[in-house]
Image (spheres, coloured by chain):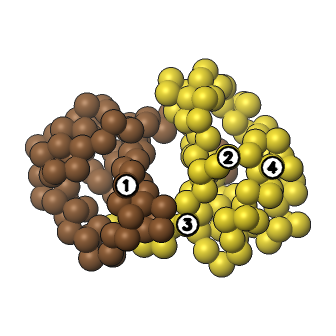
Chain colours: A brown, B yellow
């Protein structure tokens, strides 16, 4: 399993409730791909959404997002972490 | 205090040790701005670095990164979080 961060742009003015609904659409189907969307964050002013997911591959993460109706070309594998 | 995620692009092939050194340059001066860089992640293949910081403002986060030698135009305030 690897960790992935994906980025969605253009979500200006999205409300917390809408982010929650979108996240729950991922959660509802993620098991089909062996993916888990752990958390999502929103900057409504700049229209950015970030998701943190674990799963077998970038492609698996993308397939869940596609089926949930919010594909993105930006999915990054978090190979290195420092604190 | 607010939480911020910033994004740096073009860091292709960066090594873990280089990320650690860059992160430590932030840590060394962050107190001047009341900022704390909690964690940083790297996708070396796609050249992306993400940082998670807490602090008083985007401008304060940017000032630390500028002085540490790695400014970025992408600093997002994580106003909403869902899990």
Q: Residue at x 20, y 68 (%)?
A: A21
Q: Secondary structure under badge 1?
A: loop
User: Considering only order in the chain, which callout, 2 or 3, is on the residue closer to the N terminus?
Assistant: 2
Left/right placement of residue A54 relative to residue B40 reads left
Q: CA distance from mark 3 to mark 2?
A: 14 Å
Nearest the camera: B74 or A33? B74
Which chain is home to disc 3?
A: B
Q: Secondary structure under badge 4?
A: helix
Q: Which residue carries the number 1 mark?
A: A10
Q: Residue at x 86, y 50 (%)?
A: B67
Which chain is home to disc 1?
A: A
User: Considering only order in the chain, which callout, 3 or 4, is on the residue closer to the N terminus?
Assistant: 4
Q: Are marks 4 and 1 on the same chain?
A: no
Quick one: label 3, few (<14), some, or many (20+) residues within 10 Å? many
Checking the image for residue B66, the label placed there is 4
Left/right placement of residue A32 relative to residue B11 reads left
CB of mark 4 within 8 Å of CB of mark 3? no
């Amino acid at each position: 399993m690897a960790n992935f961060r994906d980025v969605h742009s253009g979500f200006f003015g999205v409300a917390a409730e809408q982010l929650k609904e979108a996240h729950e659409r991922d959660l509802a189907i993620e098991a089909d791909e062996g993916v888990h969307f752990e958390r999502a964050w929103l900057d409504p002013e700049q229209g950015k959404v970030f998701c943190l997911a674990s799963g077998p591959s970038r492609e698996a993460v993308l397939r869940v997002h596609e089926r949930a109706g919010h594909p993105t070309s930006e999915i990054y594998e978090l190979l290195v972490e420092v604190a």
